[in-house]
């Protein structure tokens, strides 16, 4: 095993699974044979990733009865109509209940493939092979699957855990700089939620990550996956602590929905959303302005926006935030901060403070 290869485990009893991180893992037939307990395999990918990695993966899976489906690329295609292409491919090839799906791509492909696996014949196995930093550190781990609706992001879906996650860090070599920065938003999030040591490491190494230093990337991916695996193991279906992983996401989802899916990348919206959550925490007297400045500085150094777009007025922003999975009994719940590594879920906050943050955002932009 290479000194750069790491293996973690998401501890969920009978549904536990490994996360393999390293270089050259797309070529490891042994890893895929461990993860796939089926004869029939359907690889789901998109038009961007397919020319880069599909043939290589199919060669690795040559001992299986393998077929593939190529979907259009983009958040705007994360919808039921496009998902139906996966079901059509499975049915046309007479895939049975013992089949497995493999998600080769970023977060959109992972979420859609997972939802297809959760739904096809009431549930079949799937394996995540994430090819973007955001999907490697976040969406491929934890079993959240689904699609978007015009009225809300990820509002249609299911919890369905993969049989394994295989992360080949070399796939980041072909990732656009903007996409890499989008993934760094989720990496920063883990430090802010409950890993202050990691947050400090990121302040020292964010430039290493942006220039794609392999050892720095492996460390950041491993640490992020370990942080998420620990939370998922304690709260698989987001009854409590797992909701903390949504730091910045309620603001971010409002940006994505309001702008139109795909205009802002998910990580870009989360980056701005984390800054807005920090500003609200400061206005509520939970943290000082110095920490807000540190957070904004790190997000900016990651190549991410620190403010929401100016063409979303505060009234519309509030309406969009109200259509969120974290709303309970009509109350908006936000993840706020008491310090680095001290995130908490709050529904009892001063609404005027939230409105002030949105207005401050508009004035700054």
Image (cartoon, grey):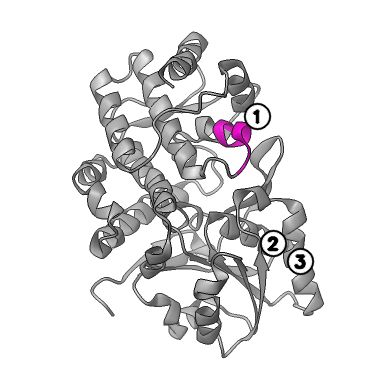
Residue 114 sits in quarter:
bottom right
Tell me the crowding category of disc 3: few under 14, some 14 to 19, or many 20 or more residues within 10 angstroms, Cα based. some
Q: Specify the segment rendered in magenta.
A: 254-261
Which mark is first along the chain, 2 or 1? 2
User: Residue 268: x and y, percent?
Assistant: 45, 40
Q: Position of residue 343 (x, y in %)?
A: 37, 32
- 257 drawn magenta: yes
Q: Earlier in the sequence, mark 3 or mark 1?
A: 3
Looking at the picture, does residue 180 appear above or below residue 276? Answer: below
Along the viewing direction, whichever of 285 and 298 lies nearer the viewer? 298
Residue shown at 43% from the left, 82% from the top: 27
Q: Is residue 212 left or right of residue 183?
A: left
Q: Is residue 305 above or below residue 28?
A: above
For marks 3 and 1, give the CA distance.
Answer: 29 Å
**Label 2 belongs to which residue?**
116
Q: Is residue 143 above or below residue 258?
A: below
Residue 353 visible (yes or no) = yes
Q: Which residue is mark 3?
A: 87
Q: Which residue is mark 1?
A: 323
Which residue sits at x=41%, y=45%? 186
Instruction: Tell me if label 1 and label 2 are in contact, CB under 8 Å.
Output: no
Q: Nearer the viewer, residue 339 or 151?
A: 151
- Do the CB atoms of the residues marked 2 and 3 lie less than 8 Å apart? yes
């Amino acid at each position: 095993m290479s000194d750069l290869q790491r293996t973690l485990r998401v501890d969920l009893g009978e549904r536990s699974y490994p996360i393999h991180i390293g270089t050259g893992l797309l070529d490891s037939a042994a890893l895929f044979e461990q993860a796939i307990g089926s004869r029939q395999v359907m690889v789901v990918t998109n038009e961007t990733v397919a020319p880069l990695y599909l043939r290589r993966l199919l060669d690795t899976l040559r001992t299986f009865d393998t077929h593939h489906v190529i979907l259009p690329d983009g958040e705007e295609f994360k919808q039921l109509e496009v998902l139906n292409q996966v079901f059509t491919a499975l049915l046309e090839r007479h895939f049975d209940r013992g089949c497995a799906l493999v998600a080769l791509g970023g977060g959109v492909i992972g979420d859609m493939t997972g939802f297809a696996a959760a739904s096809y014949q009431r549930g079949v196995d799937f394996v995540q092979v994430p090819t973007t930093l955001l999907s490697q550190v976040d969406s491929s781990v934890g079993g959240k699957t689904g699609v978007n609706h015009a009225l809300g992001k990820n509002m249609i879906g299911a919890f369905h855990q993969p049989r394994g996650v295989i992360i080949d860090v070399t796939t980041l070599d072909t990732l656009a700089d903007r996409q890499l920065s989008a993934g760094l938003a989720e990496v920063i999030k883990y430090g802010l939620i409950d890993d202050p040591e990691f947050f400090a490491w990121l302040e020292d190494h964010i430039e290493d990550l942006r220039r794609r230093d392999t050892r720095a990337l492996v460390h950041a991916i491993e640490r992020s996956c370990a942080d998420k695996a620990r939370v998922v193991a304690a709260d698989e279906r987001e009854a409590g602590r797992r909701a903390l992983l949504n730091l910045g996401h309620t603001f971010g989802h409002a940006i994505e929905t309001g702008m139109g899916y795909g205009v802002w990348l998910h990580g870009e919206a989360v980056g701005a959303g984390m800054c807005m959550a920090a500003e609200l925490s400061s206005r509520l007297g939970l943290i000082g302005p110095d920490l807000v400045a540190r957070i904004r500085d790190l997000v900016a150094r990651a190549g991410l926006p620190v403010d929401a777009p100016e063409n979303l007025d505060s009234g519309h922003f509030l309406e969009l935030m109200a259509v969120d999975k974290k709303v309970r009994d009509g109350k908006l719940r936000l993840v706020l901060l008491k310090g680095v590594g001290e995130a908490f879920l709050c529904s009892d906050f001063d609404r005027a403070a939230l409105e002030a943050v949105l207005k401050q955002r508009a004035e700054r932009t």
